[in-house]
Image (tube, rainbow, N blue to C red):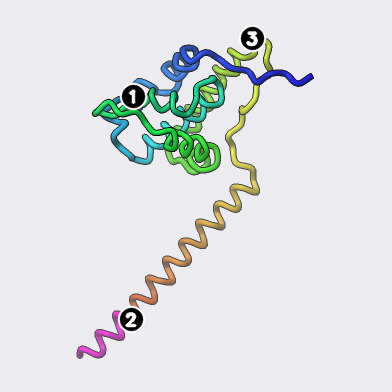
Amino acid sequence: MKKARPYLSKDAVLDILWQHGYWNQYNTTKNNDKRTRELVEFRGMYFFILYHFTKLSLANIGKLFKNSKGNPKDHATVLHGYKNFPDVYLKYNRGDLSVTYENVMSHINNTLQMKGYTPHLTTTKMSKREAMHYIQHQRKIMFTLVKKQSQLLERIKFLEKLDV
């Protein structure tokens, strides 16, 4: 028989996010109006954890994130952040998001173990293959930019010759 998916109470998860996930720093009405990369990535982590470990709907998760006018985040915004967190935000972040996520997940897994569940979602590290793919992708982007820059410089030189 298949075991039911483990859930924690909303308050338990929010308490963990408050302790380890900078909840009080990133989830403010002032910050929920902004779309800076760091804020979007942390909100994605909050959406992902709340959706995965509570029984809250996307709309109810959005109600936890109100802007300065008191409007909650739309369910589609929560869904977008939830889906992008593991594949985009977590892999390509420049800050301490992955460390924060590891701390939060460690605390959640400890809580789940005390309730008799086995831990999961523990690793966020890229595999060697994923890292090589990412590096190759970045190299292609850099090569394209350098190529375009050299083409522009050649064109500028050509136009300067015409003006002389």
Badge nearest the viewer, 1 or 2: 1
* Spatial CA span between label 3 and label 2: 68 Å
Give left or right: position of 138 versus 150.
right
The image shows residue 104, relative to residue 38, as above or below, that is: above
* Spatial CA span between label 1 and label 2: 49 Å
Q: What mark, if any, has residue 156 been given in the picture?
A: none
Task: Provide the residue designation for mark 3.
Answer: 115
**Earlier-in-chain disc, 1 versus 2:** 1
Task: Provide the residue designation for mark 1.
Answer: 25
Magenta: main secondary structure equals helix
* Spatial CA span between label 1 and label 3: 29 Å
The image position of residue 83, as x and y in percent, is 52, 38
Look at the numbered disc 2 and give the secondary structure of its residue. Answer: helix
Look at the numbered disc 3 and give the secondary structure of its residue. Answer: loop
Task: Provide the residue designation for mark 2.
Answer: 155
Q: How many marks?
A: 3
Query: Which portion, as a residue range, is magenta?
Result: 155-164
Farthest top residue in view: 114
